[in-house]
Amino acid sequence: MNEQEITRRVEQAFKDGSSIDLAMTRAGQRAFQYHAWTNTKLRIWRDGQVVELDPQDKSAQLPEGFEIPKNGTPPWIGL
């Protein structure tokens, strides 16, 4: 793939936005899962301020698109 093709694909991704939205949602889910597996609080930006979320707290108000972590070994263990 040449430089012009790469540039065109990046520009298209930003125009459409859905692939970037999906990547950000997946990154957020992975961060949430990491914090759940390490039993550490997650800090997010909500309503103009930093808010701490405890991923173990079942009543925590999670950002849209975040999933409750699945049981199992984190995918980055053993890399």
Image (cartoon, grey):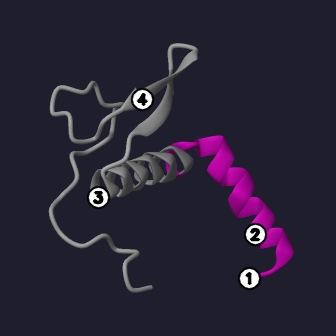
Q: Amino acid at mark 4?
A: Glu
Image disc number at residue 66: none
Name the residue at 56% across, 17% down.
49
- Per the model, the C-alpha gap separating discs 3 and 4 is 16 Å
Q: Nearer the viewer, mark 4 or mark 1?
A: 4
The magenta segment is 1-19
Q: Nearer the viewer, residue 79 or 9?
A: 79
Residue shown at the point (48%, 32%) measured from the top left: 44
Q: Secondary structure at mark 1?
A: loop
Mark 2 and mark 4 residues within 8 Å of each other at the beta carbon: no
Question: In what quadrant of the picture does the C terminus appear?
Answer: bottom left
Image location (x, y in percent) of residue 13 = 63, 52
Per the image, label 4 sits on a secondary structure element best described as strand
In the depicted structure, whether residue 1 falls above or below residue 4: below
Residue at numbered disc 1: 1
Residue beneath disc 4: 52
Of callouts 3 and 4, which one flags the residue occurring earlier in the amino acid sequence? 3
Which sits in the foreground, 43 or 12? 43
Q: Indicate the position of residue 23 as horizontal and vertical percent values.
A: 49, 53
N-terminal label among 2 and 4: 2
Residue at far top of view = 47
Q: Disc 1 residue type?
A: Met
CA distance for labels 4 and 1: 42 Å
- Label 3 belongs to which residue? 37
Residue 47, placed above or below residue 56? above
